[in-house]
Image (tube, helix red, strand yellow):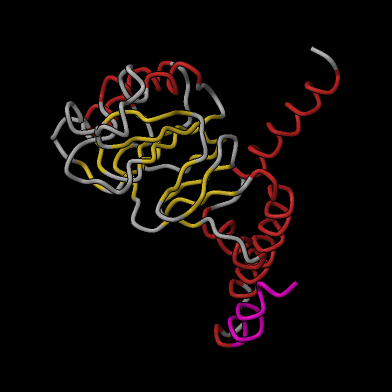
Amino acid sequence: MSAGPQRERRERDEAVARLARLDACAVSDALDSLGLPGAVLGLTALAAPRRIAGRAVTVELAEPSAEVAGSGRHLGTAAVDAAGPGDVIVVAHGGRTHAAGWGGVLSTGARRNGVEGVVVHGACRDVDEARELDLPLYATTGVPVTARGRVVEHAWNVPVDIASVPVAPGDLVIADASGVVFVPDAHAEEVLATAEAIAAKERAMVERIRAGHAMADVMSTDYETMLDR
């Protein structure tokens, strides 16, 4: 491997490491400050509710029709086979809750490959299996209904829409108990630097509170101006 790709890989890995040291709230605040979308509403941790950070490997699902024939393979399998440590599988299920867009066998494969976690915009099933596997799984809800005959994979590793937030393969993903946030790869450095500055300001506020400063003073003078640049 030449120096160029090696350097690019190191930079991408360092971006994920920096993201993992933050939380979803600081990253969301950074996106707000920069006027960028990214925070997704309505997704919650259903299994292994711990913070995850990584690069998006996307899957686009659709209901079968004359216009959408599907890929011919089981949904999600290509993404699982391609993904590994540092990756988060992101399933664009269109917010559907009448059938699952992810299930237990897929979770087993994702866990085997060291995937950081899975984000599904819609329902998933076999949540107990994901919990037993200790695989972080963020989704709209759990449902027992199979995807068979109801949902197919339209494409994978393509730009997708997650609750009106555009997500491209390789974009950064962070998820924790507060929710799921995506960072466009093109803005990664700016967003990470801004989020790190915000997190530092928050730590300073906490220290002032622990030192005995009045809450009203700390919150009024620091919190409202936290996103100022």
Q: Kindly indicate the quadrant of the structure image that contains residue 4.
A: top right
- The extreme left residue here reads 145
Report the number of discs. 0
Q: Position of residue 167 (x, y in %)?
A: 52, 45
Q: Is residue 185 above or below residue 70?
A: below
Q: Is residue 142 left or right of residue 212?
A: left
Q: Give the residue displayed 24% in from the left and 34% down from the top.
A: 65
Q: Magenta segment: does it hold 175?
A: no
Q: Magenta segment: does it hold 224?
A: yes
Q: Position of residue 111 (x, y in %)?
A: 40, 21
Q: Give the residue displayed 48% in from the left and 31% down from the top.
A: 116
Q: Position of residue 182 (x, y in %)?
A: 53, 49
Q: Is residue 93 left or right of residue 160?
A: left
Q: Is residue 225 above or below residue 164?
A: below
Q: Is residue 107 above or below residue 220?
A: above
Q: Give the residue displayed 37% in from the left and 30% down from the top.
A: 154
151 or 39, which lies in front?
Answer: 151
Magenta region: 217-229
